[in-house]
Amino acid sequence: MIQVEALTKRYGTTTAVDGLSFSALPGTVTGFLGPNGAGKSTTMRLIVGLERPTSGTATVDGHRYADLPAPLHSVGVMLDARSVHPGRTAYRHLLAHARTHGISTARVREVIEMTGLESVARRRAGTFSLGMGQRLGIATALLGDPQTLILDEPVNGLDPDGVLWVRRLVRDLAAEGRTVLLSSHLMHELALCADRVVIIGKGRLLADAPVQEIVERSAGGSLEEAYLELTAGSVEYRGRAADGTSASGGSR
Ligand SMILES: Nc1ncnc2c1ncn2[C@@H]1O[C@H](COP(=O)(O)OP(=O)(O)OP(=O)(O)O)[C@@H](O)[C@H]1O
């Protein structure tokens, strides 16, 4: 279980995360949503100890990430699929992670197969398409067979087959009793794969409820409509339509 309690992160005068509390439960896919700059990535970075909170706490199964005895076995993380060394092959990248955590070569082969990377495993990661990089990021997250998975925009760049594969994968992981927290801007996809959603805006909690409940509460009857209603006051970067009207956030 992931527990975020009164979490706040300030960068100078910017408050990226503002007194945020929510939980992601085992056996559940929790979708993490919010407009650009809402604080999703910062929250995920705080959960896995890449940032120190200004105040509040974030724990996984009751421990701060830094205190987990074998983090890769407890929490699988994909925050930035591009963070792979471009000169390393996918296989070598996974092997390097495996070696530092006492994970077998057989498991490396297993995650390569699970993520459909067999045919490109010996290619340098720098030559990978966005979607292949995402698959490698997910393979790295799965390496330690973790109880908890934290995936920042896992379907970003994937083709329709890949999107379907991620949907099935996260559903299967949750069905095995694991905790899955994933962020995405793709509402249709989240409506299909998430059990609950946590919606934030300007670092604050806007909603935390089962998908069905959020949809039923909305006038529009879809997760996208519910999301647009809930975040209308929290969108910082709003485009403009060709006719000069606002292109998003309830004024469509
Ligand atoms: N290292 C940093 N230094 C200063 N400001 C930061 C830093 N990291 C994030 N921020 C700011 O914190 C806020 C939240 O950013 P964050 O990346 O967490 O949002 P997000 O919800 O993940 O956005 P997106 O959907 O665009 O990925 C933004 O205003 C961002 O500019």
Image (cartoon, rainbow, N blue to C red):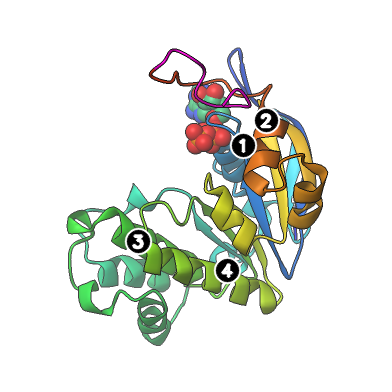
Residue 134 % position (x, y): 37, 58
- Residue type, mark 1 in image: Gly
Q: Residue at (35%, 77%) from the top-left corner?
A: 112
Closer mark to the observer between disc 2 and disc 4: 2
Sort mark 2 into few (<14), some (14-19) or many (20+) by Cα contacts within 10 Å.
Answer: many
Mark 1 → mark 2, Cα distance in angstroms:
7 Å
Q: Which mark is residue 159?
A: 3
CB-based contact (under 8 Å), mark 1 and mark 2: yes
Q: Earlier in the sequence, mark 2 or mark 4?
A: 4
Figure check: 172 above or below 191: below
Percent x, y of residue 237: 51, 21
Give me the disc on residue 231.
Answer: 2
- Determine if residue 178 is in view: yes
Q: Is mark 3 within 8 Å of ligand 1?
A: no
Mark 1, residues whose alpha carbon is within 10 Å: few (<14), some, or many (≥20)?
many
Disc 1 on helix, strand or loop?
loop
Rendered view: 79 above or below 19: below
Three-letter residue code for mark 4: Val
Provide the secondary structure element on which disc 4 rests.
Answer: helix
When asked about the image quadrant of residue 194, the answer is: bottom right
User: Mark 3: which secondary structure?
Assistant: loop
